[in-house]
């Protein structure tokens, strides 16, 4: 299944735009309860206004809140960003530390965010257990654990360490585009023949293809072996839909 996912999503990556570890930490904090697309609309102005940790530490709260307002929960997020900036200046010379144990002590950064930062800004392998990752690995029977930290450890035992970061991207990409929470697109899924949960969503290809979302849809439907059974409009409409948040 991992090989099939790697073939399906060769360009899988962190969908937040960033240029350095601080920017990724900030974008990840903003992405709570918000789409990556929305965060990416907000961050260019934010990163230009606050290039360093010290800039967040000394930010004017009203101005910062205004810049991030559209991502939701902006008061809490402003608190986290200002607290993060202050903690980085105070304890880490203004730099984002490259260690899980240090990252999780920073304001606004839990284990999931820390793993995103490690894997994508520092090339330290990390498994990101977000809602998509947890749902899919449970559906696939890779673990029955519900707790994200237990899921992380269970999957870490199954998959070689050097593959952890990319595995996280593959699984999250698949969860956003095909294996949705409520109605997975089983009948148009490239993992159908290997998946123990096949049938959790519609099995008929035309109905299932309507559930696939994202610009990669034509290729995903091709890889699933159902493209020939579908009308052009269904494929076009799937490609025009935004992947799930
Ligand atoms: S077959 Fe269905 S449950 Fe299995 S991965 Fe595909 S969409 Fe998800």
Image: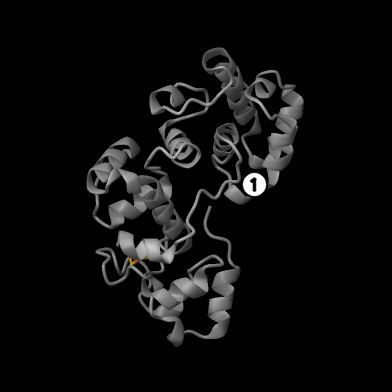
Q: Nearer the viewer, residue 54 or 203?
A: 54
Residue 119 drawn at (x, y percent): 44, 40
Q: Is residue 140 positioned above or below 145 on the image?
A: below
Q: Is residue 96 visible?
A: yes
Q: Is residue 169 left or right of residue 59?
A: left
Residue 170 drawn at (x, y percent): 41, 56
Q: Is residue 143 positioned above or below 99 on the image?
A: below
Is the distance from the Cβ of mark 1 to the nearest ligand 1 atom less than 8 Å?
no
- Splitting the image into 4 quarters, where does residue 104 fall? top left
Question: Label 1's element?
Answer: helix
Q: Nearer the viewer, residue 122 or 191?
A: 122
Kindly identify the residue that appears in the image at 56 percent across and 37 percent down.
Answer: 24
Kindly identify the residue that appears in the image at 55 percent across and 84 percent down.
Answer: 232
Residue 120 drawn at (x, y percent): 48, 42
Q: Is residue 183 positioned above or below 74 on the image?
A: below
On the image, numbered disc 1 is attached to which residue? 40
Q: Is residue 228 left or right of residue 194?
A: right
């Amino acid at each position: 299944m991992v090989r099939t996912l790697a073939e399906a999503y060769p360009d899988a990556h962190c969908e937040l735009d960033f240029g350095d570890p601080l920017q990724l930490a900030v974008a990840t904090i903003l992405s709570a309860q918000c789409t990556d697309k929305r965060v990416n609309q907000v961050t260019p102005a934010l990163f230009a206004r606050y290039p360093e940790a010290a800039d967040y530490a000394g930010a004017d709260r009203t101005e910062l809140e205004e810049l991030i307002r559209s991502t939701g929960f902006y008061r809490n997020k402003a608190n986290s960003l200002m607290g993060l900036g202050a903690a980085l200046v105070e304890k880490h010379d203004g730099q984002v530390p490259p260690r899980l144990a240090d990252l999780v002590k920073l304001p606004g950064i839990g284990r999931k965010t820390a793993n995103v930062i490690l894997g994508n800004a520092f090339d330290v392998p990390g498994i990101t257990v977000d809602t998509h990752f947890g749902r899919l690995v449970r559906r696939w029977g890779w673990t029955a654990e519900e707790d994200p930290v237990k899921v992380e450890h269970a999957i870490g035992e199954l998959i070689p360490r050097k593959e952890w970061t990319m595995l996280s991207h593959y699984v999250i990409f698949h969860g956003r585009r095909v294996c949705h929470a409520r109605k997975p697109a089983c009948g148009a899924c490239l993992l159908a023949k290997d998946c123990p949960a096949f049938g959790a969503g519609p099995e008929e290809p035309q109905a299932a293809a309507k559930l696939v979302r994202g610009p990669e849809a034509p290729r995903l439907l091709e890889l699933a072996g159902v493209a020939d059974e579908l009308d052009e409009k269904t494929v076009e409409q799937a490609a025009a839909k935004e992947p799930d948040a």
